[in-house]
Amino acid sequence: MLRKTLIISYAVLFVAFAAPFVYSVLCSAQEKSRDAEQKNEQQLQAELSRSIRLLDQGTSLEMDMHSYLVGVVAAEMPALFPHEALKAQAVAARTYAMYCVGLERHKNADVCSYSGCCQAWMSQDALRQRWGADYDKYSSMVSAAVRETAGEYLGYEGQPVLAAFHSSSAGATENSAQIWNATPYLISVPSPETEENLPQLISHVKVAPLDLRDTILSQYPHADMSGAPEGWLGRLSETASGRVDSLEIGAVPVPGTKLRQLFSLRSTDFRLEYDGSDFVFTVAGYGHGVGMSQYGAKLMAEAGADYRSILAHYYPQTSLLHFS
Ligand SMILES: [Zn+2]
């Protein structure tokens, strides 16, 4: 009887004191998520009213920022990548576009759709062709990533950053100083790709000795390629991330970036060997290696990272900002 009375008393006490507290916590959480939704909606409207001029296959197109970003994320990252990786890509693409506006890199356009210059972009018609029966599904996955991050960009000292990205890096990304200029937020950071978690990480390029000799001599006429192929390769110097800074060929140091271009290598993260009949480049990763690795973002997301931590990892010292 006494026990029952005690239980009832506790219940009354709970209802009297704790329940209003719990209720107010729940209400404030609800209010916060309503605020966040409202802010996201405002940012989306701001994005829809911003326009961007895009140079696509020789034609200058004008469109709203949201539609442009959907076309960029769809072209730059597989739609089946984890949602947080797609969101990280959306923020990087938005940041990159904002960085380009005003640079006047192109006549009558802010950006172009060539990935080797600005960032790739595909029209809805092109995406319909690429995705076929999966168009509705993939399109809504990509649009959601852009919509949920509406208005968010990475800033350094308040300005949109050069949010460079690439396909994959083996172990570490590259310092931008190695390729372009030194930039405080584009420094080498670890990246989780390995041959085990990314089977296509390693690629090979075979070059016949005569082709190697002719290609090198066409660019470096003073290279000494007179002896046997075994003796053509000299000292290799590495960048801090382990990529090729330069490799001596015929006693001439050839930059890794130049070799990448001459022999269409996927990256400057390579080693060159002579196997007795051919020269073989063994290449790791794909792309210039600077900024966010897209496969690294995928692996991080699969391991539970959200888009904010993916971006903070690949672009250190930047902050996630909103359109004002
Ligand atoms: Zn361009």
Image: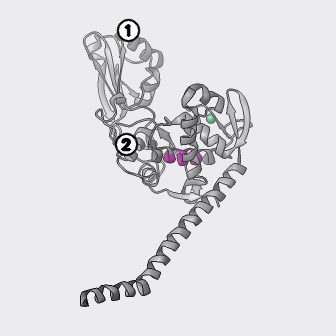
Alpha-carbon span between mark 1 and mark 2: 41 Å
Out of 221 and 88, give the one closest to the viewer: 88
SS type, badge 1 = helix
SS type, badge 2 = helix
Residue occupying the point 42% across, 27% down = 266
The region drawn magenta spans: 87-95
Q: Which residue is mark 1?
A: 210
Position of 59 compared to 259: left or right?
right
Amino acid type, residue under disc 2 in the picture: Leu
- Report the number of discs: 2
Position of 240 compared to 215: left or right?
left
Out of 23 and 179, give the one closest to the viewer: 23
Position of 83 compared to 303: left or right?
right
For the residues bearing labels 1 and 2, Cβ distance under 8 angstroms: no
Residue 299, numbered circle: 2
Tell me residue 295's x, y (percent).
41, 38
Residue 94 belongs to the span the image colors magenta: yes
Determine whether 212 is above or below 115 in the image. above
Residue occupying the point 67% across, 51% down = 47
> Mark 1 Cα within 10 Å, few/some/many (few <14, many 20+)?
few
Residue 227: quarter of image: top left
Colouring scheme, one of rainbow, by chain, secondary structure, one colour? one colour
Q: Is residue 162 visible to the viewer in this orientation of the structure?
A: no
Out of 226 and 273, give the one closest to the viewer: 273
Residue occupying the point 53% across, 68% down = 30
Quarter of the rendering occupied by the C terminus: bottom right
Mark 1 and mark 2 lie on one chain; the one further toward the N terminus is 1
Residue occupying the point 74% across, 39% down = 62
Residue 125: quarter of image: top right
Out of 147 and 110, give the one closest to the viewer: 147
